[in-house]
Image: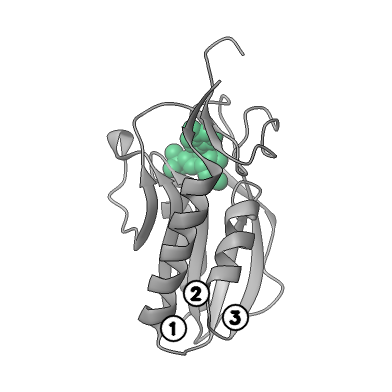
Amino acid sequence: MRTLISAEQIAARVRELGAEITRDYEGRPLVLLCVLKGSFMFAADLARAIDLPLRIEFLGVQSYGDDTKSSGVVQITLDLTRPIEDEDVLIVEDIVDTGLTLDYLRRQLLPRRPRSVKVCTLLHKPGKLARSVDIDYIGFTIDDVFVVGYGLDHAQLHRNLPEVKVLDSGS
Ligand code: IMP
Ligand code: MG
């Protein structure tokens, strides 16, 4: 597998994103919404780069379909533990590909009346957007390749790699 984004590049970008988010929310409390499983590593690093009164929530989602293509059919496997009414929520995603998952998540969250919902994704593959989705913070824009590592998996494997790698077909 070839490295697409090194651990050092990720760390530098996470620091920039954290500083930008810290500035944008101007001291207001923030709910960091970590979308499991893929964004667990990114959310853990991003949280440490944000200097705001911060609460972390986890939302477990599982998408069905074959493993390298999003079906847009999403199931919630773990729900929030607290209401988010009147709170500023930042959804932390590992990757936005077709945008179907993010679209689904927004529709789930909006009836809970948060004060605001923004999105921060580590990776964005703009080539295949099926939904026009607003993404407020993007770590890296990548080509339409299947990547693993730094939380991202293929068949649940490779999430523990410290960098983002391109999965060779056949591996
Ligand atoms: P979307 O609904 O097509 O935007 O895809 C969202 C989900 O598909 C992501 O949260 C990932 O779980 C998965 N996904 C999409 N592309 C990749 C990839 O290149 N590697 C690993 N997972 C991916
Ligand atoms: Mg995901």
Instruction: Say if residue 159 shows up in the picture.
Output: yes
User: Which one is closest to the eye, mark 3 or mark 1?
Assistant: 3
Colouring scheme applied when the structure was drawn? one colour
Helix, strand or loop status at disc 2: strand
Gap between marks 1 and 2, in whole Å?
8 Å
Q: Amino acid at mark 3?
A: Leu
Helix, strand or loop status at disc 1: loop
User: Which one is closest to the eye, mark 3 or mark 2?
Assistant: 3
Q: Amino acid at mark 2?
A: Val
Horizontally, residue 88 falls left or right of residue 148, namely: left
| Residue identifier under label 2 | 89
User: Which one is closest to the eye, mark 1 or mark 2?
Assistant: 2
- Residue 115 occupies which quadrant of the picture? bottom left
Image point (43%, 72%), residue name: 19
Contact, mark 3 vs mark 2 (Cβ under 8 Å): no
Contact, mark 1 vs mark 2 (Cβ under 8 Å): yes
| Residue identifier under label 3 | 54
